[in-house]
């Protein structure tokens, strides 16, 4: 099996390369060489996927049995279209890493692969779309929907769309799980969003990578798959596990969504993974499970991420890291000023 990984040097792309090499596959990576070193024993092609000349040079290194595209998250649809057109004749299958944000109803309602997508042209530039007043839909979602459409129009049934929700695990660059782990390690009263029994369903990066590789190897017609943990764990279990693995002498102080909102706590960022919308953790991943998705217990993801951090884990620099986590002063002020907090 010979595959091309667009990206391949950090987080999900890196895990896909590692997994492919473990399977004995021949791997080519294509990136600018700015986010980290390429894995050993890969054919590394340097270039910019928005440059037609670089794409033509890459295509000359083909053909491949499959391409896994992990590097389109910050690109407008027209650049995704450019790459798909340049490589179409050199790949038998295209596995496109997308997102549940492409759905028009995310995060308000339960999602299946038949849910309606946001409408975005396949040749749209980076200005297309908007973010709603309540944070949904998102401009990012419109752009990713347009990227899917670009790949679909060029590759047809050769295209597979992998739509994760939240991906966590060693190497995470966004900073969601690392923030909770570092906060737990610091100890003391921890601001926690009630209800404590609300289930969340992030998925481990290694499990997403394995599923993407399975789809690259599959002979089944192209399809779309929601990739979220089918079981998940409660927010209370999540915080308790963070405290356990870090040895933090902390305790959660459960505060209602109404009180958090009254104190202008930003959902999704100041308290990572917290969002009040009914559908944010209601992603149906049964189609992916039927196609072979296997998710390790999230306690293992949490423990392994802490081990990575303790081993001087350093994600690639990314501006989203600084967006996550509430300031200690603000957290303390909220906890001490709310007599109604559930301790």
Image: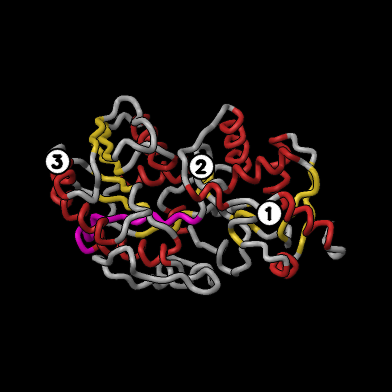
Which tag, 1 or 2, sits closer to the chain's start?
2
Taking the spot 68% from the left edge, 54% from the top edge, the residue there is 235
- 33 or 311, which is in the foreground? 33
Instruction: Tell me the element at label 1.
Output: helix
Drawn side of residue 118 relative to residue 312, left or right: left
Judge depth for marks 1 and 2 and give the one in front: 2
Residue 52 is covered by the magenta coloring: no
Res. 217 in view:
no
Instruction: Tell me the element at label 3.
Output: helix
Label 1 sits on residue: 235
Q: CA distance from mark 2 to mark 3?
A: 31 Å
In the rendered structure, which segment of residues is drawn in magenta? Answer: 153-165
Q: Position of residue 127 (x, y in %)?
A: 34, 67
Res. 165 in view:
yes
Direction right: furthest residue: 339
Which tag, 3 or 1, sits closer to the chain's start?
3
Judge depth for marks 3 and 1 and give the one in front: 3
Q: Position of residue 121 (x, y in %)?
A: 27, 70
Label 2 sits on residue: 172
Taking the spot 34% from the left edge, 56% from the top edge, the residue there is 161
- 302 or 86, which is in the foreground? 86
Taking the spot 58% from the left edge, 48% from the top edge, the residue there is 176
Quadrant (top left/top right/bottom left/bottom right) for the C terminus: bottom right
Residue 114, quarter of the rendered image? bottom left
Q: Position of residue 186 (x, y in %)?
A: 73, 39
Check contact, mark 3 vs mark 1: CB within 8 A.
Answer: no
Drawn side of residue 94 relative to residue 336, left or right: left
Label 3 sits on residue: 57
């Amino acid at each position: 099996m010979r595959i091309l990984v667009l990206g391949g040097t950090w987080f999900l792309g890196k895990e896909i390369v590692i997994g492919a090499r473990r399977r004995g596959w021949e791997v080519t990576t294509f990136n600018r060489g700015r986010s980290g070193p390429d894995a050993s024993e890969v054919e590394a092609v340097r270039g910019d996927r928005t440059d037609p000349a670089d794409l033509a040079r890459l295509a000359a290194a083909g053909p491949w049995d499959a391409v896994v595209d992990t590097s389109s998250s910050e690109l407008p649809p027209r650049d995704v279209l450019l790459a798909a057109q340049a490589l179409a004749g050199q790949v038998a299958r295209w596995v496109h890493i997308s997102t549940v944000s492409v759905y028009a109803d995310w995060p308000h309602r339960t999602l299946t692969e038949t849910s309606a997508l946001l409408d975005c042209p396949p040749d749209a530039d980076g200005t297309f779309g908007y973010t709603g007043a309540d944070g949904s839909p998102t401009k990012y979602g419109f752009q990713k929907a347009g990227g899917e459409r670009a790949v679909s129009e060029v590759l047809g049934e050769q295209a597979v769309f992998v739509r994760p929700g939240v991906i966590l695990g060693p190497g995470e660059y966004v900073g969601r799980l690392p923030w909770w782990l570092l906060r737990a390690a610091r100890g003391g009263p921890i601001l926690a969003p009630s209800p404590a029994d609300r289930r969340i369903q992030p998925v481990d990066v290694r499990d997403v990578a394995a599923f993407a590789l399975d789809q690259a190897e599959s002979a089944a017609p192209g399809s779309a798959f929601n990739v979220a943990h089918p079981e998940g764990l409660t927010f209370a279990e999540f915080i308790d596990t963070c405290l356990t693995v870090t040895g933090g002498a902390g305790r959660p102080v459960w505060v209602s969504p109404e009180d958090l909102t009254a104190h202008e706590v930003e959902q999704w960022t100041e308290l990572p993974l917290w969002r009040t919308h009914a559908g944010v953790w209601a992603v149906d991943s049964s189609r992916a499970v039927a196609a072979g998705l296997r998710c390790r217990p999230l306690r293992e993801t949490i423990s392994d991420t802490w081990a990575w951090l303790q081993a001087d884990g350093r994600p690639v620099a990314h501006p989203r890291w600084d967006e996550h986590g509430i300031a200690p002063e603000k957290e303390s002020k909220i906890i001490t000023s709310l007599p109604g907090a559930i301790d």
